[in-house]
Image (cartoon, helix red, strand yellow):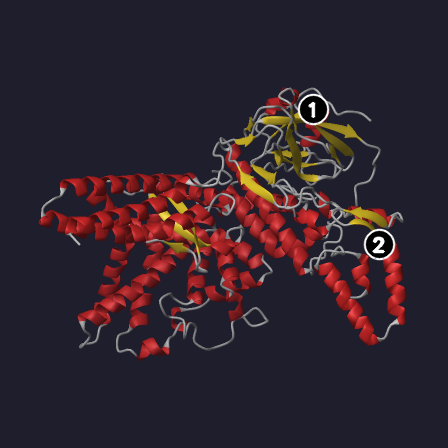
Amino acid sequence: MTVLSKGAIQDRLKLPGEHEAALVITPLLDESKFDQDSIDLRLGTHFLLPQIPPQPYFDQSGARYAKQTYLQLHAPIGSYFVLAAHQTVLGATLEFIKMPFDLSGEILTKSAVARMFMLIETAPWIHPAYRGCLTLEIANVSNASILLYPGMPIGQLVLMETAIKEPPVELSGSYVGPVFPEAPNPSNARDQLNKVGIEAYRRPGHGWVREGQMRKDLQTLLNSVSPQEKTSLQRLVEILTDTGALPSDSSVSDLVK
Amino acid sequence: MELGEQLVQDAVSLTRFVSSIVDLCDDRSSASAHLQSSERFFAYIKELSSATSVYVAISLKQKTTPTDLLQLRNEIGILRVSWRFLHEFVKSSLDADTLRLPTALVQAIIERFREIPKFDDADFVIYHSDQFNYLNVRLDVFKQQADQISSLVSGPQFPSNLSIVGIPYSQASSLFWNCLIPHELGHYVFGELALAVKFKKEIESELLKRIPSGITPQQRGQIIELLARWMEELFCDVFAVRLVGLCFSIAFTEVFDTAMFLEVSGMLPPGGSRGETEFREYPPDLLRIRQQARVLQKDGWWDTVQSLDSQYANVLMAAVGLKDSDFRCSALQANPVPVLETFFAVLPNLEVELEKAASGLQVCAQEWKDSADIIERYLEYGIVPSTLRRSTEGENFTPSPIALLNSAYRFYIRSMPALMGRIKDADPNDIEKRIRWTRRVENWTAKAIEDVLLLNGRPTK
């Protein structure tokens, strides 16, 4: 895998934006921000500050995770945002990036920023054909607050050649177009485990749930009861779901819908 | 209760009321930022509040005779009324922070407006209105109330170049529909250039030529007021078209659903009177569209309108051919005073005044045409179009915010399927998905405008 040189990056930037092999980085405020093998990226103006969740953990096995609230912030250019010691915030690059179909990229914390004990990216890989402002998971791991000035250089983009020969026929929706930091929308961890046959899991506050066995038992029960009894069972499952004893997105609930 | 004690209570009550308004400005969350114009407004309110409190406190100590105390009571009453008036605009302006405004769009429109030499330092506070309407607060009314306070308490004068515009709170996130904002800037121009006085004179002159005997001065005054209001609305429309171009008219036809005038064929129904029930406080929408279309023709936008396969363009094309005589209103025509005839006699002066008001402002159609296709191509490929390049040999260039706005609007009404066709599982007939990708296009456009302002040395704030 070859890392692109300054000249090669600039050649890609010279292609018209819609060209499959074109690299677009906009706005480019300072032409001197090219290093021999990278280009500096700046901090954008919008932030998402994680709020203290109602329960003492982030649970990515439930639908609630996607609805975790974030405080949206805007710090215009010239203003600043205070990132307290040991605090995290989602930010984004000021630059919108359109990746060529045949290059991958990686964003790295600028060394001057890293030496203040600030990390900007824990998922640094950028896929070919990606387009958008890069969401940054910024963490202040120092013992002092740090002022973040939108527009300040914060990361370095490194580009690498891949073995991909053909541009994609269609773009994946999740790779096209964010211009603000985006809140996480992870796939449900339980669903991911279900896909590989793991149907027993430990549910915070409720202990072990053996969903596969529950579903099987309920199905057996449903097959053997009268329509009136089935209605009662449906109501029972509704009560269990409403009270939180069953996850609202459980496949068990689906059986009686 | 003694008058002195009554006054202490009145003073406490007023001071608490005024402080409660200012506290809102001070208690702003650090999460929010505001336009510089709004910051100026809040600073003015705080200064005026401070002057009010000081004046009331000192006056209470100094005024001891019954006459003085009665005068102070009267003043406190006046101050309370005026502060109640200002009260309406503080919270609603605070609500319109930069996260709840199309900030880049507002900034771009103001920058464009300032290209008119006589308005080069004008500024606009935007507030959230709970009405589904865009509003320009009448500066004369606002200033009268604000300056009433200032003159009593020796406080600051309301900044002379500041105006106040309300947008429906529900439309804060829409880039395209807020292309209607320039109409409100037209009201500012109308007021600053005292065009009401001018038009009223012209209306009166035309009216006197036609007036039947027996009309009272009061009736005459009412007719002049009504026709001047119509002229003001039409002026604001054509001013908006001159300022930002076709996107204003498209937003107008979309937001006010004027395509409903058309038959499925895209034509107006044959015959019939236009505006029969619509000549009220505002002139009929079709007449407003006709006047806009005439400016679009004059400013070089018309070939674009004609080439657009859209119901919004069809309304413009249908309206432009309407003659004055196509507009009728039986109720008005039953009136012995020839109201419509007078109105249409004055109407040609609209464009004359537009030319004078917008003197020095370059028409933006050609600049837009030079970059429209490439901007739309970038949008189709999901790229923020702030740094454009036509060919490998060419140079990078940045389009103007107005070109971005018009291109993006045209893209939205004709090319969304082309964009969505490039995206996996993005069915353009699925309403939710269409909305999602429309928002994306608006975000890309807003980001591009922000970038361009930044590249030109005017960061968005």
In the rendered view, tell whether residue B353 sits above or below residue A116.
below
Q: Which residue is mark 1?
A: A38
- Describe residue B100's horizontal placement relative to residue B353 as left or right: right
Asked if residue A106 is positioned above or below residue B306 in the image, the reply reads above
Which residue is at a point 57% across and 48% down the rendered structure image?
A: B407
What is the quadrant of residue B280 in the picture? Answer: bottom left
Q: Nearer the viewer, mark 2 or mark 1?
A: 2
In the picture, the disc for residue A211 is 2
Q: Amino acid at mark 1?
A: Ser
Q: Amino acid at mark 2?
A: Glu
Query: Residue B321: x and y, percent?
Result: 46, 66
Mark 2, other Cα within 10 Å: few <14 / some 14–19 / many ≥20 = some
* Chain of residue at mark 1: A
Q: Residue B224: percent from the left, percent from the top?
A: 26, 65
Q: Nearer the viewer, residue B317 or A172?
A: A172
The residue nearer to you, when weighing B3 against B79, is B3
Front in this rendered view, residue B436 or B288 = B436
Residue A234 located left or right of residue B339: right
Residue at x 42%, y 72% (from the top left corner): B275
Write the residue at 63% across / 20% down.
A112
When asked about the image quadrant of residue B64, the answer is: top left
Q: Secondary structure at mark 2?
A: helix
Q: Badge 2 sits on which subunit?
A: A
Residue farthest along the front direction in this orientation: B1
Relative to B130, residue B30 above or below: above
- Mark sitting earlier along the chain (2/1): 1
